Image (cartoon, rainbow, N blue to C red):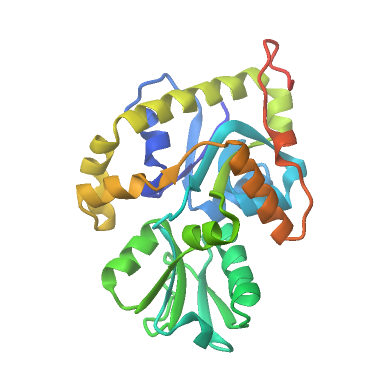
Amino acid sequence: MLKVGKIEYINVLPIYFGFIKKLDNFNHKFIEAVPSELNQMLRHGEIDISPISSYEFITNSRKYYLFPDFSISSLTKVKSVLFFSKVPIRQLHKKDVWLTKSSMTSRAFIEYLLSENYGIEPNYHYYSMKEGNLPKTATSVLAIGDDAFQLLKQKNFRFTYDLGKEWYKINKLPFVFAVWGVRKETFENYPKKVRDIFEAFKKSREYGLENLEKIASIYSKKVGLSKEECLAYYKYLNYNLTPDHIESLRKFASLLQINIQPENAILKFGGSDEIR
């Protein structure tokens, strides 16, 4: 039995919905956690396969293969990776900025955006909703997933910046927030199990994308959205890994001053379960 990571946020429910409805006889163990925790668990071998942040893949690419054609991406806006501020972004120089501990990718991009695009250097602090250490008086906050929806609903911030939109304005490419990583030793030791899990994920994603209305009906209230708002949100999300997505990963790696070729990490399942 392999251990497989599962993100708790509503944005990935279309990928996991088939598993939730038990369409497949899946005999591996799901481990639920926030993205940053899954990054660490996969890196240290505590789990075998997981969605991981683009940042984690780029900075530790020697450890991972990637599922083909799987990501969590936005084509323009993303609507759930948001930077909130009570003042215009250019007024944040030397001011306190609170960044979520839940996402390395978003943190790396907002730090780049503030420094390189806006020419400001804030004082960064880090928070976790689970730890409850985000000050109610915070001037600016980076939030992701369900946490971002909750802050948006509170309407405490005058300015909201969508990181997917900011990335698209610069690069005219989708922003790849996460990919599906497989530890190299896991694939080398259990190639058939990895392929079977990949096929199960494909079936689950297909079922989820065919049943977005059902997902929205069941889960939208969890994040304070109406069914219609939830369905509109899903229209901005994308779960593929096309050549444009690969190019976007390469550009993000360049931003981090790391030279990688993401396409070389993508698993190609041959008849004998070998990399082709």
In the image, is 242 to the left or to the right of 23? right
Q: Vertically, is 135 above or below 216?
A: below
For residue 35, side relative to residue 87 (left or right)? right
- Decide if residue 150 is in sight here: yes
Q: Nearer the viewer, residue 135 or 108?
A: 108
Quarter location, residue 133: bottom left
Up/down of 185 relative to 56, above or below: above
What is the number of callouts on the image? 0
Q: Check the image and report above or below for 217 versus 84.
A: above
- The percent coordinates of residue 118 (x first, y second) are 59, 78
Residue located 48% across and 36% down the image:
30
The outermost residue toward the top is: 271
Q: Give left or right: position of 152 versus 67.
A: left
Residue 127 in the figure: left or right of residue 231: right
Q: Residue at x 47, y 60 (%)?
A: 165
The quarter of the picture where the C terminus appears is: top right
Please state the horizontal and vertical placement of residue 267, each as a whole percent of the image.
67, 28
Asked whether residue 47 appears in the rendered view, the answer is: no
Q: Residue at x 59, y 64 (%)?
A: 109
The residue drawn where x is 39% and y is 29% is 19
Give residue 195's position: percent from left, percent from top.
60, 21
Residue 157: x and y in percent read: 35, 78
Of the 4 image quadrants, the one containing the N terminus is top right
